Image (tube, coloured by chain):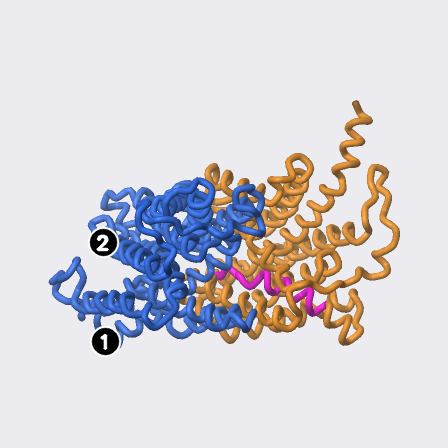
């Protein structure tokens, strides 16, 4: 009995780990979406495109400038974040007084432009990006399975980044300004806080999170222009399930749903692509505000 | 709720209230400007096939009908469905299957496509109207993505290949649609019927309640209207017409593929309506014409089409939110 269970575990463990890795990306991306939405009231449809940019910038840094993975992990989010500052200042900031839907439409247009430009420049077929030497050695033996080091690193790194983001927002002075401005921006501004700059930096930070996820994803998936749009719609479902009210909620939902997806791939592979959407429908029927959302 | 008001004002900006005619409904309940625009549109539908490729025009008309169905939701109920490709695509697949495998006549096949669209609309609408605004858009998009993955795996859609060489068949079992021009008149009639249906719905007491919900939902509720029921009926209607448009497209082009259910298709119908003018009768038709025309004539340039579409999105949102027809209506001080 136990042996059979262990065998089952051994067979299904890779799928579950793959689920956790996906969950790490869901968590990072939905965290960025939640941070941006909280402050700007804009659903950043370009989030997937910015994730893809993060991966491409890492590829360019390596192949054009010889900067390795570890450098890209810092530089790529900064570069893509700076791009986010430009977008926010030039375009998104003009929409705050309008219906939220216009923000969605604008960022959707931006996503099309970014994706199209990369498709023109690099083709649709994906570029390889090798994991760094330190993480590409022999897999770690966990007793019941062999775990590639890089995947372990992705899950751990994403987890740490998520927790760090939560700490910044909940425990620091900057985070307090941020939360206050989310509740009542004019009042915070009256206290002398530069709210427009805070908004711009929030957008940049959210975008940088997406780019960081992109760098982490580069060695796992091939770096290609469509990699973001495939992810982002699932992340939307994750966000609907979790509700955007809580930072920690979106992290838990992200990892949890990745795990569920991985388990589904073991039990009933045909449904693995749709399971998150089905869960979304069920959650909406039972609890329309989402698991962690405020009505 | 303050934010939702802005969309409404944006939408109705093309319609300065002061210039509304003193309610003298002419032809089909349209005002004079709309009546003239309708006649111009019918004339264009009749004359164009003698100058442009009927194939291109039929595709255009199918997408125009699709955009009109979409506009019924965004323009008149204020709901942004970002997943209308699901209903269009299912309509396309079901009509294709009915015509090819079951050997049904084209009008029955297209009707079944509409039924499929409406059925999906009923279930998805029922789930999605629990949330409003931005969440509604995300939910409809996610549900449509579920349909996409379903179509990717379901045997009857033939996965990546799609359903190919769909027979055009004989209309009512009598009239052979093999000739392009014969099919064109059928599709044109279908489009006009759909267009007039949408405009009739908007003019009806039901449509007036929808507009009331768009303008002030809490007030409509307090007046005793079951807002959710109205939204759902509008959603089903819109999904059904989208399904018919998809079915007509499948019969016209002869293939039903994953492109029809892909999220990019949902984006395209949003683009058509936004470019033409949200909440205008003729905007979706103009927008569909421009977008389909652009896709057809710029097809050799590959990804540039996507980039141009993105740029149009950005320009529409930043610079002219009333759309082409909305801006023209504002200039002429009429309602279109």
Numbered range of the magenta stretch: A42-58
Distance Cα–Cα, label 2 vs label 1: 24 Å
User: Is residue B121 found left or right of A227 in the rendered image?
Assistant: left
Secondary structure beneath dot 1 equals helix
Image quarter (top left, top right, bottom left or bottom right) of the N terminus of chain A: top right
Main secondary-structure element of the magenta-colored stretch: helix
> For residue B38, what is the image quadrant?
bottom left
Identify the mark nearer the N-term, 2 or 1: 2
- Percent position of residue A219, x then y: 75, 59
> For residue A220, what is the image quadrant?
bottom right
The extreme right residue here reads A138
Report the residue at 77% width, 72% height from top: A63
Q: Which residue is mark 2?
A: B200
Report the residue at 54% width, 58% height from top: A179
- Percent position of residue A267, x then y: 66, 34
Who's orange, chain-wise? A
Who's blue, chain-wise? B
Residue A65 vs A217, above or below: the answer is below
Within-10-Å neighbours for mark 2: few <14, some 14–19, many 20+: some
* Residue closer to the observer: A128 or B255: B255
Output the chain of dot 2. B
């Amino acid at each position: 009995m136990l042996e059979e269970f262990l065998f089952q575990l051994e067979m299904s463990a890779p799928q579950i780990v793959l689920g956790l890795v996906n969950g790490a990306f869901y968590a990072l991306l939905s965290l960025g979406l939640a941070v941006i939405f909280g402050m700007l009231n804009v659903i950043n449809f370009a989030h997937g495109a910015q994730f893809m940019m993060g991966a491409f910038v890492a590829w360019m840094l390596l192949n054009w400038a010889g900067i390795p993975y570890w450098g890209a992990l810092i530089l790529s989010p900064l570069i893509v974040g700076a791009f986010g500052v430009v977008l926010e200042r030039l375009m998104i900031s003009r929409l705050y007084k309008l219906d939220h839907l216009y923000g969605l439409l604008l960022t959707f247009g931006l996503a099309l432009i970014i994706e199209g430009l990369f498709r023109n420049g690099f083709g649709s077929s994906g570029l390889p990006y090798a994991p760094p030497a330190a993480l590409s050695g022999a897999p770690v033996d966990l007793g019941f399975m062999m775990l590639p080091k890089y995947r372990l690193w992705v899950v751990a790194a994403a987890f740490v980044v998520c927790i760090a983001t939560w700490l910044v927002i909940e425990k620091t002075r900057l985070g307090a300004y941020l939360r206050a401005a989310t509740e009542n921006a004019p009042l915070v501004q009256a206290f002398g806080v530069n709210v427009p700059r805070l908004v711009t930096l929030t957008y940049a930070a959210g975008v940088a999170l997406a780019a960081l996820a992109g760098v982490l994803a580069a060695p796992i998936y091939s770096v290609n222009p469509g990699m973001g749009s495939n992810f982002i719609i699932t992340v939307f479902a994750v966000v609907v399930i979790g509700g955007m009210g809580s930072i920690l909620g979106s992290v838990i939902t992200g990892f949890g749903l990745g795990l569920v997806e991985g388990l589904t791939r073991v039990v009933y592979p045909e449904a693995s692509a749709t399971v998150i959407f089905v869960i979304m429908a069920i959650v909406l029927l039972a609890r329309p505000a989402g698991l962690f959302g405020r009505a | 709720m303050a934010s939702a008001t802005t969309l409404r004002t944006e939408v109705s900006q093309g319609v300065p209230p002061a210039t509304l005619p003193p309610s003298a409904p002419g032809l089909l309940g349209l005002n004079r400007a709309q009546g003239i625009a309708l006649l111009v549109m019918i004339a264009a539908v009749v004359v164009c096939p003698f100058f442009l490729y009927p194939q291109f025009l039929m595709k255009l008309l199918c997408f125009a009908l699709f955009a009109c169905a979409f506009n019924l939701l965004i323009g008149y109920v204020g709901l942004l469905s970002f997943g209308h490709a699901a209903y269009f695509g299912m309509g396309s697949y079901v009509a294709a299957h009915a015509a090819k495998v079951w050997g049904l006549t084209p009008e029955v096949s297209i009707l079944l496509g509409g039924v499929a669209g409406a059925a999906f609309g009923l279930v998805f609408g029922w789930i999605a109207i629990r949330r409003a605004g931005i969440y509604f858009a995300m939910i409809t998009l996610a549900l449509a993505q579920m349909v996409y993955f379903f179509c990717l795996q379901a045997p009857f859609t033939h996965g990546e290949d799609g359903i190919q060489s769909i027979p055009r068949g004989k209309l009512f079992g009598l009239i052979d649609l093999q000739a392009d021009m014969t099919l064109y008149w059928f599709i044109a009639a279908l489009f006009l019927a759909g267009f007039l249906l949408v405009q009739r719905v908007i003019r009806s007491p039901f449509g007036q309640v929808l507009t009331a919900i768009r303008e002030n939902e809490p007030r409509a509720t307090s007046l005793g209207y079951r807002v959710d029921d109205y939204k759902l009926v509008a959603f089903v209607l819109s999904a059904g017409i989208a399904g018919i448009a998809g079915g007509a497209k499948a019969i016209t082009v002869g293939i039903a593929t994953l492109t029809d259910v892909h999220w990019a298709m949902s984006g395209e119908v949003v683009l058509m309506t936004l470019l033409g003018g949200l909440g205008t009768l003729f905007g979706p038709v103009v927008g569909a014409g421009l977008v389909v025309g652009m896709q057809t004539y710029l097809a050799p340039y590959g990804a540039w089409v996507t980039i141009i579409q993105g740029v149009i999105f950005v320009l529409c949102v930043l610079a002219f939110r009333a759309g082409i027809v909305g801006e023209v209506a504002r200039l002429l001080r009429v309602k279109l």
